[in-house]
Image (cartoon, rainbow, N blue to C red):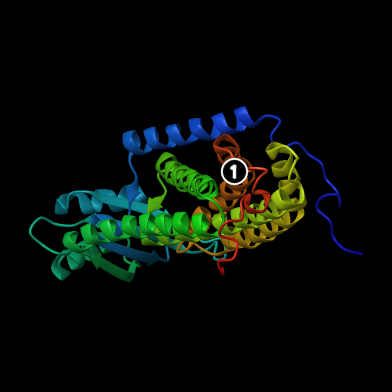
């Protein structure tokens, strides 16, 4: 007996409310951009420059006392947060982020030692388990490189999909990817989750996952455009989504199960990375089924009856 998440032959109308779903995507993208511009991102040390200190203690963490102890040192922007690890409920750990000091590439060893002395007066059992520093110049270069990496990935995908299918398909695919990336950044801005290099890696992973899902449906659409030459485009698209629905749900579902386990049990070190991918799989599946196909439908596909064999297949001989 095989597990079936959906019936063998589904005939759901995914385009019945296409104006609503497309409009909701546009509104969500605009809202995400507004939140990004107004609230901003909670950049990590990777992008801001500075020093991150991880501490561990035998006593319970008291963020207020820690902040009061460090305040006299006049270090500028200092963020202190308690670290939770579901796998170690008895762990008393915290993370201290100190901004880059003016005229210095990183917080000096003397400053770190002064922080340790100040905190030891509050809690003698405190230990510094990790100290990481990034200079302002390096952090600026990382921001530029990170966004160039995402942009280059989108351009490469645009070109690849255009070669494999038609330009309408590439526009639809990249529109879906922009949707996924912008909504992910908007959520990180709204929830003020730390945005660092691990998050950029997660966004690139989301792009790869989402485009794979989109291409599977596009490939079935291309086959059906040849088989059903006189069927209206919207019906051919609906058939294609239905025929790949089981695969889409099975792939997304199993991926989310694995990510959920990592999100709950993986610890704070990878939580931001896993959360970004978890959210990306959800919005990526949505955009593959709704947004990308809506864009192609609005742009139309060349189905000239005089050259039906070329409908959506003029670059089909290009090897993947």
Q: Quadrant of residue 128?
A: bottom left
Task: Using the image as rendered, state which of residue 148 and residue 93 is in the foreground.
Answer: 148
Secondary element at image label 1: loop
Instruction: Point out residue 33 in the picture as x, y percentages from the top left corner.
Output: 39, 36
Question: Residue placed farthest to the front in the image?
Answer: 306
Taking 80 as reference, is 32 left or right? right
Question: Residue placed farthest to the right in the image?
Answer: 1
Question: Taking 43 as reference, is 132 above or below it?
Answer: below
Confirm whether residue 307 shows in the render.
yes
Q: Quadrant of residue 119?
A: bottom left
Instruction: Point out residue 13 in the picture as x, y percentages from the top left corner.
Output: 75, 36
Instruction: Point out residue 140 in the picture as x, y percentages from the top left corner.
Output: 21, 57
Q: How many marks?
A: 1
Taking 85 as reference, is 251 left or right? right
The structure residue drawn at horizontal position 49% and vertical position 61%, both measured from the top left corner, is 205
> Which residue position is annotated with label 1?
302
Task: Using the image as rendered, state which of residue 81 and residue 68 is in the foreground.
Answer: 81
> Local crowd at mark 1 within 10 Å, few (<14), some, or many (≥20)?
some
The structure residue drawn at horizontal position 68% and vertical position 59%, both measured from the top left corner, is 251
Looking at the rendering, in which quadrant would you find the C terminus?
Answer: bottom right
Looking at the rendering, in which quadrant would you find the N terminus?
Answer: bottom right
Instruction: Point out residue 240 in the picture as x, y percentages from the top left corner.
Output: 72, 48
């Amino acid at each position: 007996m095989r597990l079936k998440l959906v019936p063998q032959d589904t005939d759901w109308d995914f385009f019945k409310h296409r104006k609503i779903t497309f409009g909701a995507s546009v509104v969500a993208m605009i809202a995400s951009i507004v939140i990004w511009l107004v609230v901003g991102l909670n950049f990590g040390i990777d992008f801001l420059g500075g020093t991150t200190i991880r501490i561990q203690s035998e006593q319970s963490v008291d963020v207020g006392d820690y902040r009061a102890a460090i305040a006299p040192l006049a270090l500028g922007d200092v963020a202190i947060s308690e670290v939770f690890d579901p796998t170690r409920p008895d762990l008393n750990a915290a993370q201290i982020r100190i901004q880059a000091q003016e005229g210095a590439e990183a917080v000096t060893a003397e400053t770190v030692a002064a922080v340790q002395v100040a905190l030891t007066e509050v809690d003698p059992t405190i230990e510094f388990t990790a100290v990481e520093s990034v200079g302002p110049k390096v952090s600026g270069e990382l921001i530029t490189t990170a966004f160039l990496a995402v942009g280059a990935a989108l351009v490469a995908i645009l070109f690849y999909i255009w070669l494999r299918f038609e330009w309408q398909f590439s526009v639809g695919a990249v529109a879906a990817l922009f949707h996924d990336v912008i909504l992910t950044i908007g959520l990180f801005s709204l929830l003020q989750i730390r945005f660092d290099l691990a998050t950029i890696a997660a966004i690139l992973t989301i792009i790869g996952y989402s485009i794979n899902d989109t291409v599977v449906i596009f490939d079935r659409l291309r086959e059906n455009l040849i088989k059903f030459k006189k069927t209206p485009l919207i019906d051919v698209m609906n058939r294609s989504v239905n025929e790949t629905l089981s695969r889409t749900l099975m792939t997304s579902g199993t991926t989310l199960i694995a990510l959920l386990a990592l999100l709950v049990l993986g610890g704070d070190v990878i939580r931001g990375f896993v959360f970004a991918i978890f959210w990306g799989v959800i919005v990526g599946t949505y955009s593959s089924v709704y947004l990308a196909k809506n864009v192609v439908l609005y742009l139309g596909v060349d189905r000239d009856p005089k050259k039906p064999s070329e409908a959506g297949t003029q670059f089909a001989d290009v090897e993947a």
